[in-house]
Image (tube, rainbow, N blue to C red):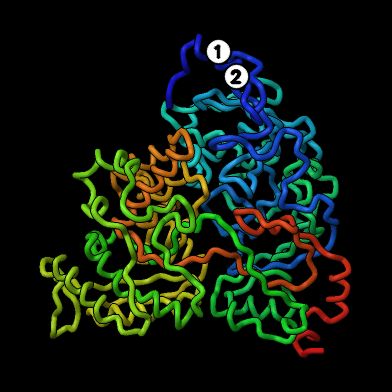
Amino acid sequence: MKLFESILIYLVSALIVFSNFGVSNASDHLYRGHGIAMHGKLKYPDNFRNFEYVNPRAPKGGTVRLGSIGGYDTFNTFIIKGRKAAGVNRLYDTLMESSADEPFSMYGLLAESVEVPKDRSWAIFTLRTGAYWHDGRPISAADLIWSFNFLLTKGHPYYRFYYGNVSKVEKIGKRRVKFSFKPGKNRELPLILGQLQVFPKHYWEHQDPTKTTLKPPLGSGPYKIKSYEPNRSITYERVENYWGRELPVNRGRHNFKQIIYEYFRDSTVAVEAFKAGRLDFRQENSSKAWATGYNIPALRNGFLLKRTFKHERTQGMQGFVFNTRRQVFNDRRVREALSYAFDFEWSNKTLFYGQYKRTESFFANSELSAVGMPSAEELVILKPFRTKLPKEVFSSSYTAPKTDGSGNNRDNLRKARNLLNRAGWKFDRDLRRLVHQDYGLPLEFEILLVSPLFERIALPFKKNLEKLGIIAHVRTVDSAQYQKRTQSFDFDMVVTTWGQSSSPGNEQRMYWASNAADRPGSRNLSGIKNDVVDELIEGLIAASDRRTLVAHSHALDRVLLWQHLVIPHWHTDNDRIVYWDKFGVPATTPKNGLVFSAWWIDQKKDVLLRSAGHGAVLRRGR
């Protein structure tokens, strides 16, 4: 990040009044405000009362029952060990809160203000005087500093990547903490520091924060743990005297008195529990369940509702991920060849009821996707690396292999065989397998799954691979084993999703950076180590405006796609929600999609639903 500007320029610039940003009032900073935008201006001024996508008069009360899969064995959210309980983040407040109708803007929650210089080489957060823990003690600068230092040194590896550019954190006033950043451009750091959850130092000094625990921890947020039964359920209760209930970022949110999570073995069981009335709300990710799974009398009677909520958020990438640490997948031609064995068009027509679009970008459904040939701005970024990149980056537009959807994938399998032959894989007629001509091993690997739902995707893929002489073993394991194996990179191929924001930044290091490839718990599941990708990530993080960020996203996206790290799956541009008709729903859905924390219990609907049986009676009809 750049050094400070010259004294003269700095003092002159400090006099500038930025619309919607506040006014500089000292020579040591250019901006102090109630929020901060990644690029451009904030949507909400310093006197705003609530976000536009909430109902500020939403009533408080009622109980909502939600489902979760697998189990849990810890309430400690900030270490790599253990399976975290669903919803436990509701216990803690963050420094700032993001809005759901802007690309990336943060507004004060624990922090009443944030200060940054023009080059964003440091950030100062001032804590609110009225913020306190559930035991009544005020939230202090010492709490913030302890939380940050612990996360950076002993927390989940994720935090080392996310906050790795912070060089120093110090208390500079009773409620003021300054974060200084390492040299280099990282305009996102003040915003991602705003996402920091703050933990009570006085509580954790008497606990061991490096271990899992089922002792309900002390929090500051809108909910606390009321009761729990490990691996079966957990109940959160709204804190009636929650200190932040009237803040603009919270008004109209956190309306349920109780939130109960019930745990189930898999999604199929959870769907049946939902239809039986044990659960109230469900986001449906299975196209089959969405199309056929809820055809019960309650749906026809109007007690059960199916709705889609359109959104404009980035869909990221889901796909079969190659572990390039494995010898069998360290050749790009092999990875490309196997992509021809996945028949998306057949799957979409036969299995998904035509509900999906093929994903062809790591930033799908957004302006960040690399579409068509590289633009002039992209070429400026990419040309210095021409000799290190596949020629297709400059000569071709990436498109995933396509079929006619008939299930006859012969043309694509022929292309796959040609690629495999060039990579040294020859068909052994005696073994009826592909064997490498140099080291004599067969092309064989395991597809590791955590949900039986993906078996219907993986098994047809496996059959196509068999036609090429490739043996793929499909194995579904429980969530604990899956977590352990993926965190230690003990797999050949998995299905995963890389979520993306509308303003990508530091998290890309954890996804793709070379120094994340061998760090347990990182999201660099593919194991990519590529100097060009590392430099593109840093250029993305340093982007000074939205146009530059978009161009760097295109460049990074294009390079990743031509590495063939994944066999892309699919995406949709709406949230599919099924719920029992007991809720009030805000009139406005923001660009980033549904915000469930802004829903509330409609008492009249709830009474009517309970009088009808909320499950057993409704399934029999009326």
The image quadrant of residue 404 is: bottom left
Element type at mark 1 = helix
Q: Residue 146, image x and y in percent?
A: 61, 34
User: Which disc, if any, is residue 186?
Assistant: none
Residue 15 x/y as whole percent? 61, 15
Which residue sits at x=51%, y=74%? 355
* Residue 509 visible in the shown view: no
- For label 1, the crowd category at 10 Å Cα-Cα, with few meaning under 14, some 14 to 19 and many 20 or more, is few
Crowding at mark 2 (Cα within 10 Å: few <14, some 14-19, many 20+): few
Q: Residue visible at 74% across and 68% down?
A: 65
Q: Quadrant of the N terminus?
A: top left
Give the residue number, with chain letter if any, for mark 2: 16
The amino acid marked with disc number 1 is Val
Indicate left or right for 356 with 344 as reference: right
- Is 107 on the left or on the right of 318, as rendered? right
Residue at figure coordinates x 36%, y 84% from the top left: 406
Real-space CA distance between mark 1 and mark 2, rounded to the nearest whole angstrom: 7 Å
Q: Can you tell which quarter of the image residue 50 is in? A: top right
Label 2: state its secondary structure. loop
Q: Quadrant of the C terminus?
A: bottom right
Residue holding disc 1? 12
How far from the left and from the top, in percent, is residue 510?
Answer: 43, 47
Residue nearest the observer in this picture, 458 or 70: 458
